[in-house]
Amino acid sequence: MCLLTSAAVVSYHPPPAKGRQFYTKVCAAKMRLCCDFRAVSNRWMTLSFGFVQLLYLVFFLSGASALLFETLWFRLAGLTFGNSVWASSTVLASFMAGLALGNWLAGRRAPKSERPARLYALLEVSIGVSGLALVLLFPLLTGLFAPLFRMLQPQPAALNAVRLGIAFVLMVVPAIAMGATLPVLVRALSRDSNGFGQLLGRLYGWNTLGALAGAVLGEAVLIERFGLRGTGAIAALLNFAAAGGALYVARGLSTEPADVTNEENRTIPAGHTAPLLAAAFLAGAIVLALEVVWFRFLLLFNDGTSLAFALMLATVLLGIALGGLAGGWLFRLDPAAERWTSAIALLGGFAVTICYGSFVAPGQPSGGTAAIAMRNVSLSLRLMLPVAILSGVLFVLLGRAVERKLGDATRATSRLTLANTLGATLGAIVGGFLLLPHLGMERSFFTLAMAYGLVALLAMAGDRERIRTSREKLIIGGAGAFFLLPLAFFPFGLLRNYFLPSVIARFTVDGSRVIAQREGLTETATYLRLDLWRAPYAYRLMTNGHSMSASMLPSQRYMRLFVHLPVAFEPAPKRALLISYGVGTTAQSLTEIPSLESIDVVDISRDNVELSRLRDFGGRHPLDDPRLHVHIEDGRFFLLTTAQKFDLVTAEPPPPKHAGIVNLYSREYFGLIRDRLNEGGLVTYWLPIYQMDAKEARSLLGAFCSTFDDCTLWAGSGAELIMMGSKGPMRPVSADVVSKQWRDPTTASELARIGVESPLMLGATFIGDAAWLKGYVGSTPPLIDDFPLRLSYRFSNVVDPDLYPLLDRVAAQRRFAASAWARRVWPNSLRLGTLHTFPLEAGISWFFLHPHKPMPAEAGDALRKTPYVVYPLILLNSDERQQELALAARKRGITDPFSSWVLGIGALARRDYGAAVSLLRDAERRSPSPEVTADRKLAEELSAKP
């Protein structure tokens, strides 16, 4: 057979007249090579090219499936084990440990396999079956493990150890199979040592391209359309298709050849690969640590949605894939390309520094979803792509160097992937737990860039004999210069002086200034303070590039109503739970409820809670209240594991479209809250309708109202609405109960400061009861864990016109008049007064929806027809805190025109028209403006009337 094949080659390429002797030697070499592969049939020789391309496609499908399964497992594991940084890290460590174990087992078992293509097909089937089983099993395990987690919750170390063990056992089968696929496929395709570099690069590249496709399609299309279980089924089908392709290749061969060992290096001790494997370990650690730092940095400029994370991940995968393919191509040009490993590592460090130093902070995002997505891609490409490409090339070069040392392709691939995977595991942990919290982003970039120099030294030590010529030494020396020069001039201070100011610029136009910044385990937190007359007026907490919470009047209003609204119906709650601390406004309101005996606060970030110490609460800090207990955990896991019951639960988690947050708005999550309530207990929950379209709002309302039959919707401030629900039917309340808070001087003062100066004004925040809300939701499916992207990645700060019915106060007044719930629960003696108060609430809503617009006509009517003080003050664009600071400034001798205007508005709201006219005339004379003139005319008009 070998003779016939060689003869066919010779007959197709007739030897030239000259050089016949050389050509004869070539033919003889081909014959020997063919005879070494005695197991290879004629069919393999004629079809091997097509089979190889098919196996590349197979590995592409395998990569797509793997990324889909990883995404699904990590989503579902977060629901079972929690989404805290410790829980996420233990799940990641468990998965990576499974991959590493698969790498190791493949190195021991795959070289003995006579039919590696069939073994590969078996691995793909096992991934598909076990992966889908895990997707289906995770939701069932949540309740099963809850008692165990509840018992271990007071012992964090033991809890994390159990999380690690359970996660490893659950994911061990599919993770081992995933880890074994690359060495086994190398075993199936490897023909000779010289072709190993090309083969490894192509397989690595195509598999990573498949992962890229899985990352983007899963987040943008599959999960939204088919849900988690449906996407799991699609991932399993991809595995089965990959297995079918591998079996087709296996049937196309009568038998499959064994690996061809590298005879030249067969006797080299395996220990000599230690420096190369250490380089692979460190390279994997650097890339994963960089990914953690990159993502944190880009979140300063991105919106933080799941799609944004998917696009950032896709950019890294694209770079690694292109690098893998480029590495294979290099071996086609230069069979000894591994001699450039050190140079590539040095260029990697150079690229880290240059990409960071040359990064230009973008402006504020604008346009639709596609425009914002393209902006995110552009930012990711500029920062990450060059380094990711070099990382992919480095992996292939190190693999070829290890293979040349070991003389065995399968074992080399196994050891390479084992070292790289273990390094990646360590890198992710080091990046999140050590570098960012202790060094910060900028020094982390510098440290990781420097670490590439160590990779270069290890690669040089492990393969020194390949660097012989002066040209080679000169090229590596040049790469070293490229590496060291930018490090010597590393742009320290760029983050503090350029990037962070550009991020917070839109929040400092009012004069706010940064008083603290902290790069913690979960986010980069920035605390801002706005001063008036050298005294603190308001605070803002930013996490990454997003304003997460603030203490301005609009925020104060709805955050305090989270507490005071349910307390009007349940006047003596004993135990309360607050999920998400923010800047502490809601916590302060809870501490002002005298009946509360215990207040539990759950927040995922210790840094955010501690930064609130910088805020002046004008009295005792809520964290100093002995009834208050802080738990650093994610809210869902706390509800799952706590045995406590509460009379009141209130929550304002991060925006629902931020990555990993949607499951804090699902029907299953609301069910956990309901289970933790005492009978008759109440829950209030944030509904930011400006961050979703009408269908998404209906889906979220449907999830809430399908859990709490007696659900209602209330106005907070502008488009910040409040959902309220009860465990069991709400009991009727008397006017005496509702009015209790206004008889308490402390709570009455706090309610007045947010414009709720009477029980009638509280009742006028009503939007709709359960009957109306269920009709409004209609046939829209509720938001559930299996379909998290029903609340999609699309993000906007503009209210959808289809949501205006929720903001129409005239329609809300009609609904209140017709509501069976209002007739049953709200005191009859307050019904008529409440109905007449709805127009006042309309003025408040108008102001919060359109801040800093010309004074509405309602301000004058409020002054003429109501006894309220704060209500007209708000309509005139001031508030009680501003009044206090202006008065204190006057006492210190500060008489600027702004303080005159503020105090003039205050006098007008108190109906002291003479003082108002005098102060406003002074402000107008010293700093004329249309707004001040309009206020002065109103004061003069009112002062002229008896």
Image (cartoon, helix red, strand yellow):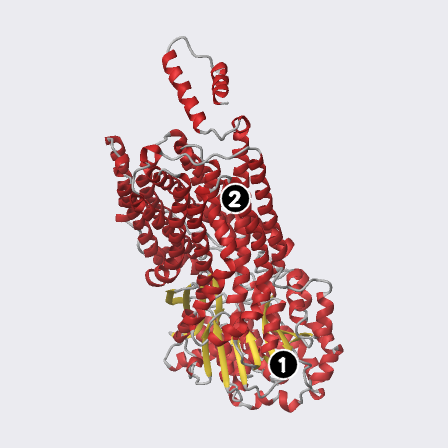
Q: Please state the total of marks drawn on the protein image.
A: 2
Q: Above or below — where is 556 with respect to 429?
A: below
In the image, is 674 to the left or to the right of 361?
right
The percent coordinates of residue 313 (x first, y second) are 48, 50
**Between 178 and 318, which is closer to the camera in this rendering?**
178
| Residue 141 shows in this picture | yes
| Residue 530 shows in this picture | no
Q: Name the residue type under label 2.
A: Leu
What residue is rendered at 50% in x and 21% in y? 5
Task: Say whether disc 2 or disc 1 marks the residue closer to the N-terminus.
Answer: 2
Q: Secondary structure at mark 2?
A: helix
* Spatial separation of the CA atoms under disc 2 and disc 1: 72 Å
The percent coordinates of residue 307 (x first, y second) are 54, 54
In the image, is 351 to the left or to the right of 736?
left
The percent coordinates of residue 171 (x first, y second) are 51, 58
Which residue in the structure is indicated by mark 1?
761
Please say if the residues under marks 2 and 1 sit with CB atoms less than 8 Å apart: no
What residue is rendered at 37% in x and 39% in y? 403
Q: Secondary structure at mark 1?
A: helix
The percent coordinates of residue 800 (x first, y second) are 64, 60
Q: Above or below — where is 461 with respect to 516?
A: above
**Which of labels 2 and 1 is toward the front?**
2
Q: Quadrant of the C terminus?
A: bottom right
In the image, is 873 to the left or to the right of 521?
right
**Between 929 and 750, which is closer to the camera in this rendering?**
750
Which residue in the structure is indicated by mark 2?
119
Q: Label 2 crowding class (10 Å Cα cut-off): few <14, some 14-19, many 20+?
A: many
Q: Name the residue type under label 1.
A: Met
